[in-house]
Amino acid sequence: MILLLGLLSISFGSILIRFSQEAPPLVIAFYRMFWSLVVLSPFCCFGRDRISLPHFDSRRILAGIALALHFAFWISSLSYTSVAVSVLLVNTSPVLVALLSYLAFSERLSWCGIFGITLTICGSLILVWEDLSRLGNPTGAVLALLGALMLGVYLVAGKKIRQTESLLQYVIPVYFIAAVVLGALAMIQGYSFTEYSGETHLFMILLGLVPQVMGHTSYNWAIRYTTATLIAVIVVAEPFLATIWAWWLLGEPVTSSIMGGGILVASGIVLVSAKGFKK
């Protein structure tokens, strides 16, 4: 039930970002982290989940920086491409992590893993081609893939911590670091944090509450208790839900290339996540 709630919540993230695009991507990403901290912080001020300075260790710092860059790249991609292409590509993170683990650490891929990586690469190329043929610009697709890479780093950095510590002891420091990084990047760019309509600020509040607190945080909870197969199924379901919302609420077309590429990407993610490595 918690994962289902997380899936529904996170699938609205790209729609809320679209509604917030009066603000620059870095500002949207900052407020996503900021409002999630406002909601979650009171729960960790007292009791066993109380946060102390030692909780800002190197792994959490790495995870926080990776999360900040994930949102910076991905939210920027939505300025250049469709919700469907952006969300499908950003969810290829399990496959990118598997490929990097093979190349950098010589982890042994299974035949299912190799086939899954091949399917995902083929599907991603179709989605990039969709942007080239329809928009003449692959920037959105490339930014989404960079976002996927950073999401993979974030998940890998956090998995071991979540085996031994509570959810809030992990996410509060990581979300705080991500907010600081995004706020600093926005200030360096000279962006305003206030000069936007009340409607835009409302959508950014909802972005922190719904897809971040209810969505991403539930995924972090699930890392400790669920199987890779179940997480993979949830991961591939989210882009298809987001595509439906974008078609319904934003009138974005769903082309045959998007459907074909999406099916290949989703199949590859499930194969890699469930049976990607030799035991």
Image: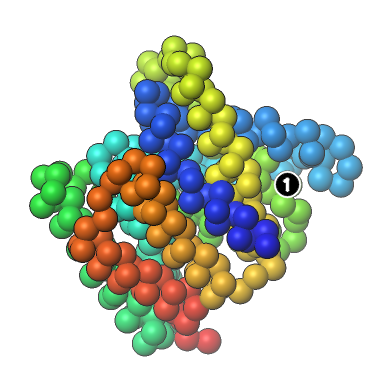
Front residue of 262/58: it is 262
Q: Residue drawn at (65%, 70%), measured in percent from left and top?
A: 226
**x and y percentages locating residue 144 in the rendered image:** 33, 49
* Residue reaching furthest to the right: 47
Q: Residue drawn at (55%, 56%), measured in percent from left and top?
A: 7
Q: Is residue 93 among the parts visible in the rendering?
A: yes
**x and y percentages locating residue 184 in the rendered image:** 47, 25
The color scheme shown is rainbow
Q: How many marks?
A: 1
Front residue of 44/201: it is 201
Front residue of 211/251: it is 251
In the rendered image of this protein, does residue 255 appear above or below residue 24?
below
Front residue of 141/134: it is 134
In the rendered image of this protein, does residue 215 appear above or below residue 23?
below
Q: Amino acid at mark 1?
A: Leu
Badge 1: few (under 14), some or many (20 or more) residues near its Cα, within 10 Å?
many
Quadrant (top left/top right/bottom left/bottom right) for the N terminus: bottom right
Q: Quadrant of residue 101?
A: bottom left
Q: Is residue 106 left or right of residue 132?
A: right
Q: Residue drawn at (38%, 35%), measured in percent from left and top?
A: 18
**x and y percentages locating residue 202 in the rendered image:** 54, 25
In the rendered image of this protein, does residue 266 appear above or below residue 192?
below
Q: Is residue 125 left or right of residue 210?
A: left
Q: Secondary structure at mark 1?
A: helix
In the rendered image of this protein, does residue 204 appear above or below residue 169?
above
Q: Quadrant of residue 208?
A: top right
Q: Residue drawn at (37%, 74%), measured in percent from left and top?
A: 267
Q: Is residue 63 among the parts visible in the rendering?
A: no
Q: Is residue 115 left or right of residue 67?
A: left
* Residue reaching furthest to the top: 195
Which residue matches tag 1?
168
